[in-house]
Amino acid sequence: MVTGAAGGIGRSVALRLAAEGYLVFACDLHEDRVEEALAGREGVVPFGADVSDRGQVSRLVDAAVARGRVKALVNAAGIHRPAPFLETVEDDFDLLMRVNVKGTYLPSLLLGRAMVEGGGGSVVNFSSVAAHHLTASSALYGATKGAVLSLTRGMAVSLAPHGVRVNAVSPGPVETPMNAHRREDPEYVKAMIDRVPLGRQGRPEEVADAVSFLVGEGSSWMTGTVLEVDGGISVLR
């Protein structure tokens, strides 16, 4: 199961896992967006659900489990509302917490129970370089991604005895539709690239590579780990 599957990174993850032979339940807020993003791809089942709504997540999990044992969950759904801290608004705080944190918690809770009953599995959460290397406009977003890091570690310890591994990826600036409008500003792009030792933005496929590793058997002795996929930004903290 991949949430946020209509977005740049989520879409790449869904396509990568489907290409590896998984049957992928690809979830986003609106099913038609998933269908458009993944148009006719084999091995993909589009599903519309709000990951912060328990009832909708429950229906998603029931539909996936009805098709067989679910091996992995990738919590890629997330949003960003950049603003200097004193210009932030409470509604954005609530929205970011609901989607980025609760939207990680609920699928992990409900599908995690099914994974335990099925003998184990792998959960991959999405944090961000913003959890520890912030800009002046990323306080709220960074707070939610810091919460995802703590949630990942707590889940890993709690679920390890049940054979469920929980890890996270922490991407840096990646070329996605979420930041497309900001990439039109040359000053923004230069400031962003200047923070990256490898000197460029990442590609969604490069993050999907890391997710594929964490889902697969190559990471079978890893849990509670955070993979920094950020072009070296984390080295500078």
Image (tube, helix red, strand yellow):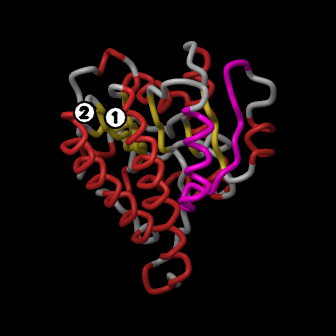
The front one of 159 and 138 is 159
Percent of width and height locating residue 161: 19, 34
Residue drawn at (75%, 45%) of the image: 31
| Label 2 neighbour load within 10 Å: few <14, some 14-19, many 20+ | some
Taking the magenta stretch, the answer to whether it contains residue 158 is: no
Q: Which of the numbered marks, if any, corresponds to residue 116? A: 1
Percent of width and height locating residue 151: 30, 54
Q: Is residue 115 left or right of residue 191?
A: left
Quarter of the picture holding the N terminus = top right
**Distance in Å between CA atoms under marks 2 and 1:** 6 Å
Residue drawn at (27%, 47%) of the image: 155
Q: Which of the numbered marks, if any, corresponds to residue 20? A: none
Amino acid type of the residue that numbered disc 2 sits on in the rendered structure: His
Residue drawn at (44%, 64%) of the image: 141
Q: What secondary structure is marked by label 2? A: helix
Percent of width and height locating residue 70: 48, 28
Q: What secondary structure is marked by label 1? A: helix
Query: In this picture, is 119 found above or below 156?
Result: above
Residue drawn at (58%, 39%) of the image: 10
Percent of width and height locating residue 224: 23, 39
The front one of 186 and 218 is 218
Taking the magenta stretch, the answer to whether it contains residue 60 is: yes
| Residues at marks 2 and 1 touching, judged by CB atoms closer than 8 Å | yes
Q: Is residue 177 left or right of residue 140?
A: right
Query: Range of the magenta residues?
Result: 42-65
| Label 1 neighbour load within 10 Å: few <14, some 14-19, many 20+ | some
Residue at the disc numbered 2: 162
Amino acid type of the residue that numbered disc 1 sits on in the rendered structure: Val
Query: In this picture, is 29 found above or below 74?
Result: below
Residue 166: image quadrant is: top left
The front one of 39 and 193 is 39
Residue 36: image quadrant is: top right
